[in-house]
C-alpha cells in the first residue's frame, strides 16, 4: 500500500485566494511498504529523499492529507456544527425530506462535467456494511459471486448478491481492509442484505455484520479530469491502479479511505470518511474544480451509462447473467449461493434475455412493452431524457436472438427505439475459466 511520510496541505476555496508557502516532505519513490506500523520508502531507515512544493495553508475548511496504516473505522457522528447537509445546502443543494441531495440546480452542467471535467457526488445515503471476523473472507466468498479468496488487503472488486436461483439482489462495491471488508450497496437493499447475511452466519462462524452508515460519509468523483484532481490532492499514488485498489489516509487527524472506481465509473474514485471530515473534504474537492452533482442528475447518468439498479433492472424476475454483470462473477471458485443455477445457464446456454439501452423517439414509461414485428420481446425498465432534453433513453430487457446492436424496436405501438450497448454493459466480459478467476 502506497504512502508518504509527511503531511501535504490542500487548500479550500478561501485559502486558495491567499496562499502561504510552506515546505512539505514527500518521498520520491511511489512504492512503499510498512514496517512495524511505520511507512518508509524503499530505503528503509535511511534518510528519506525530499522534494519541496508550494501549497496553501491549512484552514478549518481545507484538508491535510496524510497516509496512515490500515485500521478499522471506529467513528462517531459529527458535532452538529459540522453537519454535512448544512454545508451542502449552503452550496445551493436542494434536499428531499429524507436528506438526499436531489439537485444543485445545475443538472445539465454537472452532466457536461462528467463528460469533460470532474464531478463530485455525496452518496452517503447509499448503504455501507462492515463485515469483520476471522471468517469474513470465506463467508462473503460463499455468499456472493466474486472470488474473495484471491484478493488481498488493499484490493477490491464488484460482487453481486443473488438468490439461490441466481436472481439479482444488488451489486456491491467491496474493499478488502486489514481487519474487515467494507461493502457499498444500494440504499434500498442495505437493510435486507444485512438481514440476509446475518441469516447465513452459523454458530461457529467468526463473522460480524455492522451497518456503518451513521458512522461514515461517502463521496465519489468521476470524469476525465479525475486523475489530475487526484494528483493535485497529492493522492496520485492511486492513479493508474487496478479497480478497487484503496489506500488509507488521515485528513485533519481523521481517517479517510480513498479507492479506485465507483458505482458510476471505473475511472473515478471513492472517498469513505468520518462524518466530521466530510465538510472539509467536500469543500476541498469543489475548490479543486469538481462540479457538484445531485441525485436527479445521477439517475439520468446511470441510465445513460446503462447501470442496473435494484427495483428496476435488478429484481427477482431477472438473473445475474441476463443483467450482464460478467465482471462480477467467478466461474471457478466452487460452491456459492446461486452457483448451480449460473453454471447450468452457462452450460446449456439458458440465458433467455439480456439488458439493452434503447434510444427512443419519445418518452416511455417503465413497464412499457417492447415489440419487434408485432411480437412482444421485452419491456422498458428505466427511462430518462438526454442532456438538455435533446433526446430520450431507456433501459430494457429484450429476448435473445430478436435484436442486435442497431436494431429497431417499437415501444407501446408508436415509440420508435434503437437498441444500443451502453458503456457499463459494453465493458462486461465473461470471465476466463482459469483458476484465478
Image (spheres, helix red, strand yellow):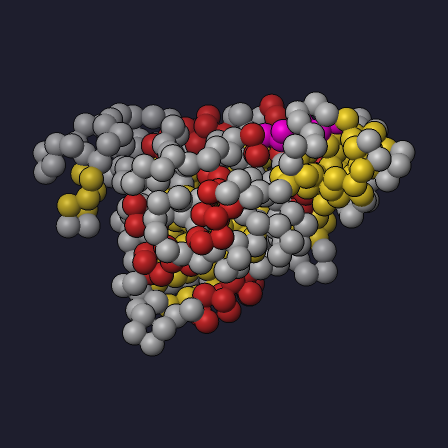
On-image quarter of the N terminus: top left
**At x 46% / y 39%, what residue is drawn?**
327
- The spot of residue 203 in percent (x, y) is 33, 76
When the figure is inspected, residue 98 is found, relative to residue 296, above or below; the finding is below
Looking at this rendering, what residue extends furthest in the right direction?
414
Closer to the camera in the image, 35 or 336: 336
Looking at this rendering, what residue extends furthest in the bottom direction?
203
**At x 48% / y 48%, what residue is drawn?**
344
Give residue 234's quadrant in the image: top left
Give residue 403's quadrant in the image: top right
Looking at this rendering, what residue extends furthest in the front direction?
348
On-image quarter of the C terminus: top left
* Left-right relation of 181 to 81: left
- The spot of residue 391 in percent (x, y) is 79, 28
When the figure is inspected, residue 129 is found, relative to residue 157, above or below; the finding is below
* Left-right relation of 116 to 73: right
- Residue 394 in view of the camera: yes
- The spot of residue 113 in percent (x, y) is 63, 28
**At x 45% / y 47%, what residue is drawn?**
343
Closer to the camera in the image, 216 or 46: 216
Q: Which residues are magenta?
A: 418-423
Q: Is residue 421 magenta?
A: yes
**At x 70% / y 32%, what residue is drawn?**
402
- The spot of residue 299 in percent (x, y) is 68, 43
When the figure is inspected, residue 240 is found, relative to residue 282, above or below; the finding is above
Amino acid at each position: 500500500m502506497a504512502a508518504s511520510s509527511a503531511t501535504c496541505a490542500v487548500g479550500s476555496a478561501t485559502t486558495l485566494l491567499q496562499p502561504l508557502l510552506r515546505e512539505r516532505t514527500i518521498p520520491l519513490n511511489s512504492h512503499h511498504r510498512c514496517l512495524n506500523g511505520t511507512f518508509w520508502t524503499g530505503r528503509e531507515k535511511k534518510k528519506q529523499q525530499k522534494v519541496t512544493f508550494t501549497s496553501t495553508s491549512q484552514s478549518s475548511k481545507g484538508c491535510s492529507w496524510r497516509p496512515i496504516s490500515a485500521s478499522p473505522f471506529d467513528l462517531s457522528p459529527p458535532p452538529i456544527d459540522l453537519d454535512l447537509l448544512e454545508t451542502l445546502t449552503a452550496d445551493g443543494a436542494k434536499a428531499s425530506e429524507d436528506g438526499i441531495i436531489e439537485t444543485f440546480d445545475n443538472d445539465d452542467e454537472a452532466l457536461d462535467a462528467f463528460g469533460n471535467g470532474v464531478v463530485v457526488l455525496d452518496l452517503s445515503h447509499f448503504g455501507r456494511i462492515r463485515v469483520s471476523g476471522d471468517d469474513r473472507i470465506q463467508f462473503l466468498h460463499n455468499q456472493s459471486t466474486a472470488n474473495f479468496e484471491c484478493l488481498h488487503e488493499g484490493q477490491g472488486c464488484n460482487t453481486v448478491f443473488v438468490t439461490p436461483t441466481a436472481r439479482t439482489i444488488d451489486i456491491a462495491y467491496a474493499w478488502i481492509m486489514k481487519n474487515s471488508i467494507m461493502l457499498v450497496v444500494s440504499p434500498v437493499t442495505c437493510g435486507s442484505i444485512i438481514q440476509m447475511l446475518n441469516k447465513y452466519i452459523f454458530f461457529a462462524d467468526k463473522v460480524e455484520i455492522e451497518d456503518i452508515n451513521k458512522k461514515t460519509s461517502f463521496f465519489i468523483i468521476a470524469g476525465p479530469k479525475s486523475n489530475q484532481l487526484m494528483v493535485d490532492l497529492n493522492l496520485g499514488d492511486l492513479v493508474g491502479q487496478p479497480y478497487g485498489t484503496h489506500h488509507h489516509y488521515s485528513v485533519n487527524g481523521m481517517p479517510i479511505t480513498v479507492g479506485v472506481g465507483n458505482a458510476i465509473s471505473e475511472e473515478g474514485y471513492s472517498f469513505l470518511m468520518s462524518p466530521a471530515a466530510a465538510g472539509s473534504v467536500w469543500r476541498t474537492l469543489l475548490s479543486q474544480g469538481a462540479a457538484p452533482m445531485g441525485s436527479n442528475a445521477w439517475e439520468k447518468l446511470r441510465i445513460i451509462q446503462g447501470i442496473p439498479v435494484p427495483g428496476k433492472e435488478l429484481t427477482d424476475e431477472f438473473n445475474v447473467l441476463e443483467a450482464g454483470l460478467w465482471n462480477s462473477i467467478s466461474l471457478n471458485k466452487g460452491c456459492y449461493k446461486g452457483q448451480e443455477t449460473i453454471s447450468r445457464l452457462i452450460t446449456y446456454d439458458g440465458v433467455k434475455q439480456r439488458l439493452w439501452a434503447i434510444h427512443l423517439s419519445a418518452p416511455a414509461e417503465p413497464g412499457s412493452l417492447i415489440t419487434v414485428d408485432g411480437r412482444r420481446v421485452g419491456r422498458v425498465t428505466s427511462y430518462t431524457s438526454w442532456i438538455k432534453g435533446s433526446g430520450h433513453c431507456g433501459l430494457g430487457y429484450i429476448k435473445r436472438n430478436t435484436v442486435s446492436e442497431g436494431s429497431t424496436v417499437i415501444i407501446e405501438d408508436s415509440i420508435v427505439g434503437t437498441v444500443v450497448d451502453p458503456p457499463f454493459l459494453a465493458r462486461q466480459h465473461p470471465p476466463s475459466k482459469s483458476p484465478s478467476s
